[in-house]
């Protein structure tokens, strides 16, 4: 009976049934993660972090798929995103993006990988740098990736 719920149900379009992603994009792998281990703190002699948040993770995402990573607080969702974005170096495992090996560090990534793999923060109001205007924040990727210099 909630008005918001009713508006969501009214917006549904059952006549527009989409095919499952597996039918749309057969064998079109975009991101593959194999044997990923990552965490925080000092590393032992084998290069493993003292606090392991992710251990031996395998994941395949096909082109066109939308996935959700669900888990309680502290389960590793953000750590996984940080590794994929290159903000946290994995202790073990491999990442392949669009057929090319993906470096675990930002220094080893290409400009094209920077453009195509980016973080979208859940709470943008806490993610924006207060030292810069919103205009400057939005203009930066346009200048960096597309060479736009307009005002």
Image: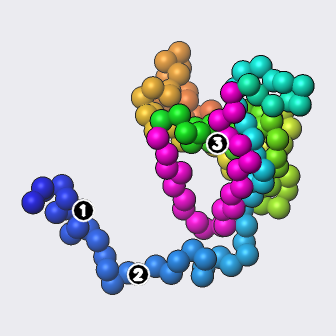
Whether residue 85 is visible here, answered yes or no, is no
Instruction: Write the start and end of the magenta stretch as one range.
Output: 51-72
Q: Name the one closer to the observer, 94 or 126.
A: 94
Residue at which label 1 appears: 8
Give the x, y percent position of residue 147: 71, 41
- The image quadrant where one finds the C terminus is top right
- The image quadrant where one finds the N terminus is bottom left
In this view, the mark in front (1 or 3): 3
Numbered disc 3: secondary structure = helix
Give the x, y percent position of residue 114: 73, 43
Residue that extends furthest to the top in the rendered view of this protein: 131
Give the x, y percent position of residue 74: 53, 34
Q: Is residue 60 magenta?
A: yes
Q: In the rendered structure, which disc, 2 or 3, sits on the residue that comes first in sequence?
A: 2
Numbered disc 1: secondary structure = helix
Count of labels shown? 3
Left or right placement of residue 70 versus residue 150 in this view: left
Residue 8 in the image: above or below residue 140? below
Q: Residue shown at 90%/25% (left/top)? A: 45
Q: Residues within 10 Å of mark 2 (few under 14, many from 20)?
A: few
Residue 44 in the image: above or below residue 138? above
- The answer to the question of whether label 2 and label 1 lie on touching residues, with beta carbons closer than 8 A, is no
Residue at which label 2 appears: 17
Residue at which label 3 appears: 80
Q: Name the one closer to the observer, 93 or 82.
A: 93
Q: Residue shown at 18%/55% (left/top)? A: 4
Give the x, y percent position of residue 66: 54, 62
Q: Residue shown at 53%/51% (left/top)? A: 69
Work out how far the residue at label 1 is from the one at label 3, CA to CA, in angstroms.
Answer: 31 Å
Work out how far the residue at label 2 is from the one at label 1, CA to CA, in angstroms.
Answer: 17 Å
Numbered disc 2: secondary structure = loop
């Amino acid at each position: 009976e909630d008005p918001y719920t009713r508006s969501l149900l009214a917006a549904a379009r059952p006549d527009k049934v989409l095919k499952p992603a597996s039918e749309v994009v057969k064998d079109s792998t975009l991101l593959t993660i194999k044997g990923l281990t990552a965490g925080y703190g000092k590393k032992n002699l084998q290069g493993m972090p003292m606090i392991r948040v992710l251990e031996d993770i395998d994941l395949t995402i096909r082109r066109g798929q939308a996935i959700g990573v669900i888990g309680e607080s502290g389960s590793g969702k953000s750590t996984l995103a940080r590794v994929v974005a290159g903000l946290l170096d994995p202790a073990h495992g491999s990442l392949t993006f669009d057929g090319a090996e993906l470096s675990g560090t930002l220094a080893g990534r290409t400009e094209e990988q920077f453009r195509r793999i980016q973080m979208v923060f859940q709470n943008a109001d806490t993610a924006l740098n207060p030292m810069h205007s919103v205009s400057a924040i939005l203009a930066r990727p346009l200048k960096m990736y597309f060479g736009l210099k307009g005002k």
